[in-house]
Image (cartoon, rainbow, N blue to C red):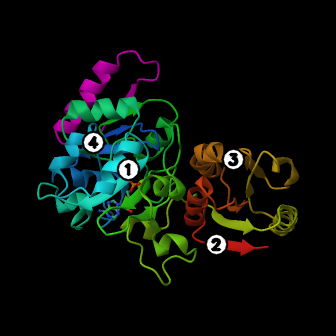
């Protein structure tokens, strides 16, 4: 299959490009498009024949459910059975934006979209291209991240092309995404909303809006998969991972730097890399040192994280040492992605 690349970065010919893309989705094809979180790989989420193509292109396990994307709040009414009051409040506060809510699904949502579950995840993105495309397609758009399953999520159109060229119908280039990590997912089907995946919308922001919110035990526990089965099925897979072996060092910054440098010295003949910060990048003796941003700016770190992980692959890093970050607020989502990238390989200094 030839993948058509459509560049909408300069804002010209947007209508023409989106019209074509919407036709592809209506006809059961696949279009990758920018959202404010990461690039998504879209198909008609109500089309049982289109949805499997997403799984095939990504190499995604079929029990890992998809998020349905809508462009207006009213569109949710067809796809969910009931909307609790707290969901109206969250929608009011955070939609359009990087928040996904899980509801009981209506009958028109195929099990192929929900990985066999009775629930469905829904999000209204704020990215203009995304919202316009969904509106023009006239259907809820199922869109997981537009990467090969297991690789770091795509934050640029070039990342999508790397993974999916030749496997999907179209890629829309809308430039680098804004946020850079996936949406916060909250399960709204129980009495108390539960955070299934941390993201840009933090626990604090949610509970300020609706009061009590819980965090899924499996997300809290670092040694995932041992004791707790995560409620968001996708969270059980090793994910966001560069090809090299990755290990996270936690603890006093000076000691972390010292220890990493000691390890690097022992690894003769291996291409070593460090995921560092602006504050520390000049202090390492690895073959490859990349700063993910300043420690003073968590949003910038979130924005750069997946791009940096892909850079390690590009540069052929074999062993990657990573610094760690405070786990409060957005840092919780950043560390969640880092832990998964490293396959929970952590050294406490
Ligand atoms: P992605 O779009 O690639 O970020 O993946 C979407 C993630 O949303 C999946 O991996 C699941 O963890 C989660 N998800 C989607 N639908 C549901 C659902 N019905 N219940 C719980 N989690 C869900
Ligand atoms: Mg994904």
Closer to the N terminus: mark 2 or mark 3?
Answer: 3
Tell me if residue 234 comes above or below residue 27 in the rendering.
below
Question: Which one is earlier in the sequence, the residue at label 3 or at label 4?
Answer: 4
Viewer-side label of 2, 4: 4
Mark 1 to mark 3: distance in Å? Answer: 31 Å
Res. 70 mark: 4
Residue 66 in view, yes or no: no
Is residue 128 shown in magenta? Answer: no
In primary-sequence order, the first of circles 2 and 1 is 1
Marks 2 and 4, the one that precedes in the sequence: 4
Gap between marks 4 and 1 measured at Cα: 15 Å
Q: Mark 1 CB in 8 Å range of ligand 1?
A: no
Of tags 3 and 4, the one toward the viewer is 4
- Report how far apart the C-alphas of labels 3 and 4 lie in the structure: 32 Å
Left or right: where does residue 313 sit relative to residue 57? right
Q: Of marks 1 and 3, which one's residue comes earlier in the chain?
A: 1
Label 3: how many residues lie within 10 Å, few (<14), some (14-19) or many (20+)? many
Is residue 327 at least partly visible in the picture? yes
Q: In whole angstroms, how far apart are the C-alphas of marks 2 and 1?
A: 35 Å
Query: Pointer 2: what residue?
Result: 345
Helix, strand or loop at label 2? It is loop
Q: Which mark is residue 90?
A: 1
Residue furthest to the bottom in view is 227
What residue sits 83% from the left and 61% below the top? 253
Badge 4: residue crowd in 10 Å (few <14, some 14–19, many ≥20):
many
The residue at the point 47 percent across, 51 percent down is 182
Label disc, if present, on residue 292 of the rendered structure: 3
Left or right of 91? Residue 312 is right
Span colored in magenta: 1-29
In this view, the residue in front, 218 or 133, is 218
Q: 327 or 31, which lies in front?
A: 327
């Amino acid at each position: 299959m030839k993948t058509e690349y459509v560049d909408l970065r300069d804002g010209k010919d947007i209508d023409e490009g989106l019209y074509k893309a919407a036709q592809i989705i209506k006809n059961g094809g696949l279009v990758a498009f920018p959202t404010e979180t990461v690039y998504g790989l879209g198909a008609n989420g109500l089309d049982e024949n289109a949805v499997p193509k997403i799984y095939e292109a990504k190499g995604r396990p079929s029990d890992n459910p998809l998020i349905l994307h809508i462009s207006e709040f009213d569109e949710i009414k067809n796809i969910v059975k009931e909307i609790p009051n707290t969901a109206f409040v969250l929608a009011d506060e955070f939609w359009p934006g990087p928040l996904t809510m899980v509801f009981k699904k209506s009958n028109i949502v195929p099990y192929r979209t929900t990985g066999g579950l009775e629930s469905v995840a829904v999000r209204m993105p704020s990215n203009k291209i995304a919202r316009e495309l969904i509106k023009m397609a006239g259907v809820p758009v199922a869109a997981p991240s537009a990467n090969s399953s297991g690789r770091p999520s795509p934050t640029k159109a070039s990342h999508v092309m790397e993974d999916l060229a030749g496997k999907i119908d179209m890629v829309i280039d809308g430039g680098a995404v804004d946020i850079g990590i996936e949406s916060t997912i909250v399960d709204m089907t129980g009495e108390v909303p539960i955070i299934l995946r941390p993201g840009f919308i933090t626990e604090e922001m949610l509970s300020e809006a609706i009061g009590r919110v819980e965090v899924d035990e499996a997300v809290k526990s670092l040694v995932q998969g041992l004791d707790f089965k995560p409620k968001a099925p996708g969270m059980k897979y090793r994910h966001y991972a560069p090809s090299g072996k990755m290990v996270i060092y936690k603890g006093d910054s000076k000691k972390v730097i010292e220890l990493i440098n000691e390890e690097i010295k022992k690894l003769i003949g291996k291409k070593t890399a460090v995921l560092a910060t602006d504050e520390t990048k000049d202090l390492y003796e690895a073959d490859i040192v990349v700063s993910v941003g300043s420690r003073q700016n968590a949003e910038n770190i979130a924005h750069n994280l997946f791009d940096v992980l892909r850079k390690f692959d590009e540069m052929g890093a074999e062993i990657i040492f990573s610094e760690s970050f405070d786990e409060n607020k957005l840092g919780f989502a950043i560390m969640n992605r880092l832990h998964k990238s490293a396959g929970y390989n952590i050294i406490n200094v």
